[in-house]
Each structure stands twice: as structure tokens, then as C-alpha cells.
Amino acid sequence: MNTCISISGLGKKYRITHRDAVKYKTFRDEIVRISSNFIQSIAKRKILTSNIYEEFWALKNIHLEIKQGERIGIIGKNGAGKSTLLKLLSRITVPTTGKIELYGHLASLLEVGTGFHPELTGRENIYLNGAILGMRRNDIAKKFDEIIAFAETERFLDTPVKHYSNGMYVRLAFSVAAHLEPDILIIDEVLAVGDAAFQKKCLGKVREVGNEGRTILFVSHNMDTIRPLCQRGILLEKGKLIDDGDISSVITKYIQSYESNQYSIHSYTSREGIGGTKITDVFIEKIQDEVTTTSSISIKIDALVDKEYQNGKQVDIGIGIDTIDGRRIATVVSSWAGCSVYTGGKLLVSKCKIPCLPFVPGRYLISVSVIYNNTMLDCIVHCGEFTITGNNNNVFLTKRNSLHGDIDIPCQFTYTSHSG
């Protein structure tokens, strides 16, 4: 299998400015200071400004070799360097150190409208993107009807794309990138903008593109999306390559990096929802030190409520439970449990008690959300976890493992025995 991307010693350094280090003065003070001692003021300014910059390595010493036809999931926490790596590969920015060798045409979807000219129509941008990918006009024309049909934007084909909604932008941009047959397709979490039906449609197209032997690099925080789509995983952490291997093992290593009972998530930026509330803290209270299938846990969720939602609106609190590799096995919602939750001020504190955990021993992940009128206000995926251990008093539970399924179904057997 031929190499299509070769990366050696790749690094990207940024210079961060700390404005707080500069002491601002009024114009009059500055004039007086300069007139009183011009030379001294210049020397002081050099000293003052010498400490206001900080070097930050978004990526450092990355070595990778990617073969033609591989489908690779790039995962990591926010700030790990995922988007920086994709921008370097897409030649949107240049590396500070190292080099990248690309063999073949590359198309990238890093954000809404990447590669589109806002003043041009959808039709014109299709031909522009094709030209950027090195395709001839006749080749683009052959794919034109497929692109439009997939994007479902026929009515707005001759409208400047600056008037498109985010969803229309994504549909057309993805359709162009997928149908113009680039050798390498790079996709960031831009697909999260589309609706659920179109996301499913896109993922099906990505699989089709991968099966045709083209290379795909896919970034997402949704492990349910990455796991079935990709064969290989790359885990980044603080700009460094932590793991590279089978996608399932890389996902497990990524998820295992969350290890606490209390999760302060003021700076957690991987959120979904339209806003209106902001989940700030999640606390998992275990009744016993050792959690078994018969144990109970309580999950406390703190959320800040925007002013427009503070006047007694009824909301739903949702909690999802996933396996360590990101498979959803249970969901609980406050209204399903017969509890009506109302906002009544700036802070909303809710608690959910789960009386038993009928899952096989292992580690499980918590996702939390606040919902209003079937619309997601805020959702954070995999922001907490708990571990179920085998119950030594029950020899049958110790024989269970994930190969037997995730749920420990309560049941009762009866039998009769006959001699003949």
C-alpha cells in the first residue's frame, strides 16, 4: 500500500500576547513622561514589552505515515492540537518545524464554508472548488448533478453562498468535497452543524469514499461516529502524539484519561446545544466505596441559567450512560421518571438517583444535558465516569464479562425434572 501522507518532526509554535502585562496610561501622562526623560522612557518600554509574549507549541515533534485508503480518526481533548494538525495538512498555515509530504489531491472541510467564496453562487463555487482540486471543467460537469442532488440545494444554486444558512453551507461544501474524488479527504467536526438525517447521509458517503480506496482523516468528539467509521486512531494530547493504533484501543486510552468523581467543567468547550443554560459541575456520589451491580449512585448536576430561561420554564435533565468504547446502553430523562424540573433563578441544581446498575463489571461513562421543549440547550459528552466491580459474594457475577453483553438482566428460572 502506497504512502499518501508522510509527516516528520512536525511542530507549530504560536506567540501569545498577554495584554495584562502592559500598564496603560493616559495620553497626558505619556506626553509628560516622554518630554521629561525621552531616553529613559524608551529603555523602560523595552523592558516592559520584553515579557508580554509567551511561546506556545500547539504541536511538537509529530511523526506519522499514512497509507493510501486508510480511514483515520484523530481524537483528543480540546487544545490537543487536532485542528492545528488538519490546518497544517490543508496548508492553511505553515509549520514551524518539520515537513509534510502529500501525494495526491487533498480536500478539507475544517469549518463552515471552507474554500467557498461568499460572493459567488453555489454553482460557481462548485466549479471553483473543483479547479482548486485540479479537476478539469468537463470532469466537474459530469459530477455536477450528483453534487446538487446530494446537497439538496437545487433552489439556491444561483444564489451567492453568503446568503446560505450554516446547514446549507455544510451540505454543499461536503457534497463538493466528497463527489469531486480527492485522493485525501479531511473532515473536522463541521458535520455537527447539519441535521441528524444529513449527518447520517454524510457518514454513509464517507464510508463509500473510504471503500473506494481514498484516504480519510476524521476529527470528532463523538466516539460512536468514529469507531465504526475508522480503522486506525491517532490520539493527541497537549500537542504531542500519545497513541497510534487500532481505533478501539486508542478510543479506550482516550476515555481512560478521565479519572475523577467530581468534574469541574467551567472550561469544557466540547458542548452541543443552542445555549440558554450552561452545565458547570457534575458530581457522581457513590453510596458504597465499591460499586457493584446492586449498588446505587447519585449524579448531581449544576447549571447556570440565562435570564431568558429563569422565569419558571420547564426543562428536562438528561443523563446518558455509555460503555468505555462509547456505545450508548442507557438513557434517563427527568420527565420520563415523572419529575417536572422548573427553572427559578440563575442556578439550577438537579440530582438523579439510580437505585441499581444492572451492567456487567467495567467502566462506564456519563453524559449530561439540559433540554427545553425537545431542544438541546446544553450537552456535554463523557464528562464523568464510574466503575462497576465484580461482587465477590456472587460467584455468577464474577464469571460475567463484556462478551456476554452489557446488561445484567434480572430473571428467575424454574424447572421440573422427570425420570422418564
Image: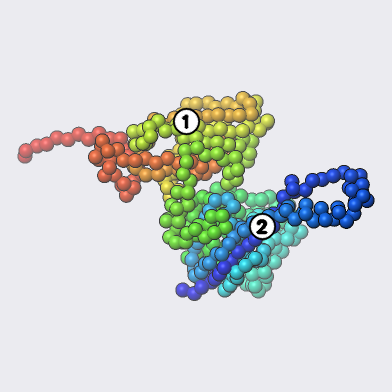
Model colouring: rainbow
Instruction: Give the number of callouts.
Output: 2
> Residue 176 in the image: x percent, y percent?
62, 62
Residue linked to disc 2: 55
Which of discs 2 and 1 lies nearer the camera? The answer is: 2
Earlier in the chain: of badge 2 and badge 1, it is: 2
Which three-letter amino acid code belongs to the residue tagged 2? Glu
Is 177 on the left-hand or right-hand side of 285?
Answer: right
Figure quadrant of the C terminus: top left
Q: Which residue lies at the image location 71% right of the left edge and 64% below the top edge?
A: 124
User: From mark 2 to mark 1, how far is it between C-alphas?
Assistant: 44 Å
Three-letter code, disc 1: Cys
Q: Quadrant of residue 342?
A: top right
Q: Nearest the camera: 342 or 264?
A: 264
Whether tag 2 and tag 1 are in contact, CB under 8 A, the answer is no
Q: Is residue 419 left or right of residue 361?
A: left
Say above or below: 246 vs 389: below
